[in-house]
Amino acid sequence: MGGLPALAGSERPFAEKKLAVNPAWTDRHEESPMAPMKPERRDADPDLAGSLSLLQLARRWHTTQKQIRRLLGQEQLGFIQVCGRFRVPRAEVERYERDQRSS
């Protein structure tokens, strides 16, 4: 007759195994044994850490990206371009905010 081969008493095909846990991970996430679904976000380029995207700046100032682009076009706000994307240095943001408060 066909079927599964007989197993000796000590052989269990699905024996429970204890998984090794990375101690560095458990120190940070003691409450959950599962890995997070998304890795923690890190700026890929440290040079960008000191600048804001147009979206970030628009949210900070409660306006639109279009209005931020107008300020760039009118040269009221300095910017850099990285891989075709506009970034506004934090120092430039702070300068513009100071100027707006004083006027």
Image (tube, rainbow, N blue to C red):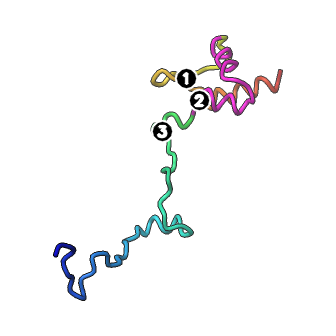
The region drawn magenta spans 51-73
Q: Nearer the viewer, residue 11 or 59?
A: 11
Residue 61 placement (x, y as % from top left): 73, 30
Check residue 60 for magenta coloring. yes
Give the residue number, with chain letter if any, for mark 2.
Answer: 53
Question: Residue at position x 51%, y 50% from top?
Answer: 40
Question: Residue at position x 27%, y 76% from top?
Answer: 13
Question: Disc 2 versus disc 1: distance between alpha carbons?
Answer: 6 Å
Residue 103 sits in quarter: top right
For disc 1, the neighbor class at 10 Å (few under 14, some 14 to 19, many from 20) is some
Look at label 2 and name its amino acid: Ser
Residue 100 placement (x, y as % from top left): 78, 23
Question: Disc 2 versus disc 3: distance between alpha carbons?
Answer: 14 Å
Any mark on residue 86, and which? 1
Any mark on residue 5, and which? none
Give the residue number, with chain letter if any, for mark 3.
Answer: 46
Look at label 1 and name its amino acid: Phe
* 77 to the left or right of 44: right
* Furthest residue in direction front, as rendered: 1
* Furthest residue in direction bottom, as rendered: 9
